[in-house]
Amino acid sequence: MVRFESEAKLPTRYGDFRIRVYREGDKEHAVLIREPLREPVLVRVHSECLTGDVFGSLRCDCGEQLEYALEKIGKEGGILIYLRQEGRGIGLANKIRAYHLQDLGLDTVEANHQLGFEADLRNYEPAFEILKDLGIRKIRLMTNNPEKIVDLTRYGIEVVERIPVQVKPNPHNEKYLKTKKEKLGHLLNII
């Protein structure tokens, strides 16, 4: 179960938000809310990516997706749910192990399998619980991942529109993006 912990104002370069923290066991998920909220609410469910979001890694598109979402929500109003499930749910140390295997030639899915994990272990139920707590039932979801849509719909959220979050590939993430499209079914038209 996810429970509300705290809230404050958070001015950012994307505008003034409210930040709320929700606890799920030992994980603390962050939620940024930018008024006005108009139903269907613009929402981005973003899984933590320390290397991309904080360090600007070019191996993925995560940091650029996060910036795009914050900019769009900053202009239109909406909600960013930042879920603490690093490395598609395998944790930071295993994600770095997977990076090493990718350096040796495996793709992101093969690396996860080599480490004994499924391709994607993320869980979007916490996002549903957070939206439920906020009284949100209809959303416009910024995603390329059809599994997010399936999961949120299964939990009772009506996804009335999917908004692509596409960034330009670079030489370091082309194989990664191609794998996301071909093996994970992500809806990418840039590769």
Image (spheres, rainbow, N blue to C red):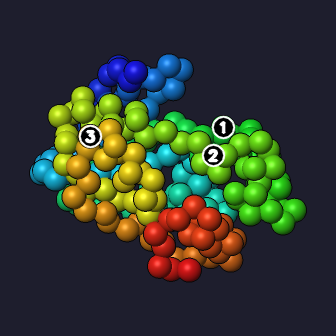
In three-dimensional space, the C-alpha distance between marks 1 and 2, rounded to whole angstroms, equals: 5 Å
Nearest-to-viewer mark from 3 and 1? 3
Residue 57 percent across, percent down from the top left: 64, 59
Look at mark 2 in the image and give the residue it sits on. Answer: 87
Task: Using the rendered view, name the quadrant where residue 174 is placed.
Answer: bottom right
Q: Amino acid at mark 3?
A: Gly
Under circle 1, the secondary element is loop
Look at mark 3 in the image and give the residue it sits on. Answer: 156
Q: Are marks 1 and 2 in contact (CB under 8 Å)?
A: yes
In three-dimensional space, the C-alpha distance between marks 3 and 2, rounded to whole angstroms, equals: 26 Å
Under circle 2, the secondary element is helix
Q: Earlier in the sequence, mark 3 or mark 1?
A: 1
Look at mark 1 in the image and give the residue it sits on. Answer: 91
Q: Residues within 10 Å of mark 2 (few under 14, many from 20)?
A: many
The single residue placed furthest to the right in the displayed view is 104
Q: Is residue 81 left or right of residue 168?
A: left
**Residue at (37% x, 38% y) in the render:** 127
Q: Earlier in the sequence, mark 3 or mark 2?
A: 2
Q: Amino acid at mark 2?
A: Gly
**Residue at (62% x, 65% y) in the render:** 183
